[in-house]
Amino acid sequence: MSLSPIKKILKPQLVIDGAGVEINRVFGGNDTKLTDPFLLLDHLKNDDPDNPIAGFPWHPHRGIETITYMIEGGIHHEDSIGNSGILRSGDVQWMTAGSGIIHQEMPAKDAGAIFHGFQLWANLPSSRKMMDPRYQDIKSGQIPEVVDDDGTKVRVITGSFWGKTGPVTGIVTNPRYLDISLPPNIDRTIEVELDQNAFAYVFSGSGTFKNASLPVNAPTEYVSNEGISETMPALPFENRTLVLFDTGSEIRVQTGAQGMRMLLVSGRPLKEPVAWRGPIVMNTQEELAAAFQEYRDGTFLKHR
């Protein structure tokens, strides 16, 4: 087993999207090679019961798959080809935009104003950009949960882990998506796929990750978004921190007094060119321009 070195640490940036929704953009729109095959991760959280989020009115997608994971609250989705449904606490939706879909995602009217969830974008390879659109709506009770002897709890959304396989299947990039809750003050390793890009996003609690490439007794120094100090053996992380890992077969984490909850996601990189603007991701600028022209012309939808 080899410990995965840490290649970058990022804090989310506050952006405004949809109908004026404040979003913690964990990553997206910059160096796609760092997170390939993943393009974007948004963390949406609203704790104000008197100020519900406005939602995301009608907009198109092409060339990607979007993964929406609700922690708390509810969201109502519907699209221009007749699909409709509501995601509630613990539910997951995996939408394959493929050749094109126009949809909206709005707060569920009966779910209250408290809202907490994530949306991850996975790229599609050039050979599958124009595949048929599809949805997989997965209820919370369908997601397997496994608890280890030390109290570590893992929800397996897609991929396989500790003998369980997630219910979201047939995803083109075949990723693994885990929601991991770790109890306070433990030190443990977690396996990752050796040939895949992996990241952890800590969204509750705190702790440290061991950096494989550094000497055990090296002094601790400050780490910024610009990169990793070469003299830091263990890197501390608090709530809302993204950790991008380099090639290895496991990560090692030590939790703080409050424990830690994180998403651990990995996928095999596509290593293809990316042409991206807004909600559409293609491989060339010509394909991107054609997609937007079709949207203006009313010929965007290829499958109804």
Image: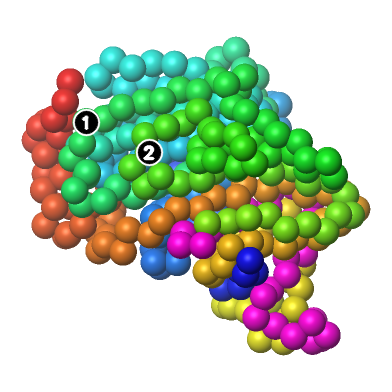
Whether tag 2 and tag 1 are in contact, CB under 8 A, the answer is no
Which residue is nearer to you in this view: 99 or 300?
99
Q: Amino acid at mark 2?
A: Ile
Q: Position of residue 290 (x, y in %)?
A: 11, 48
Q: State which mark lies toward you, 2 or 1.
A: 2
* Badge number at residue 132: 1
Q: Which residues are magenta?
A: 194-221
Q: Say whether residue 19 is visible.
A: no
Q: Position of residue 2 (x, y in %)?
A: 62, 69
From the image, which quarter does the C terminus lie in?
A: top left
Where is 261 relative to 107, above or below?
below
The residue singled out by tag 2 in the image is 171
Position of the N terminus by quadrant: bottom right
The secondary element bearing badge 2 is classed as loop
Residue 166 drawn at (x, y percent): 53, 33
Q: Amino acid at mark 1?
A: Asp
| Residue 270 in view, yes or no | yes
Q: Which residue: 24% across, 59% down?
A: 275
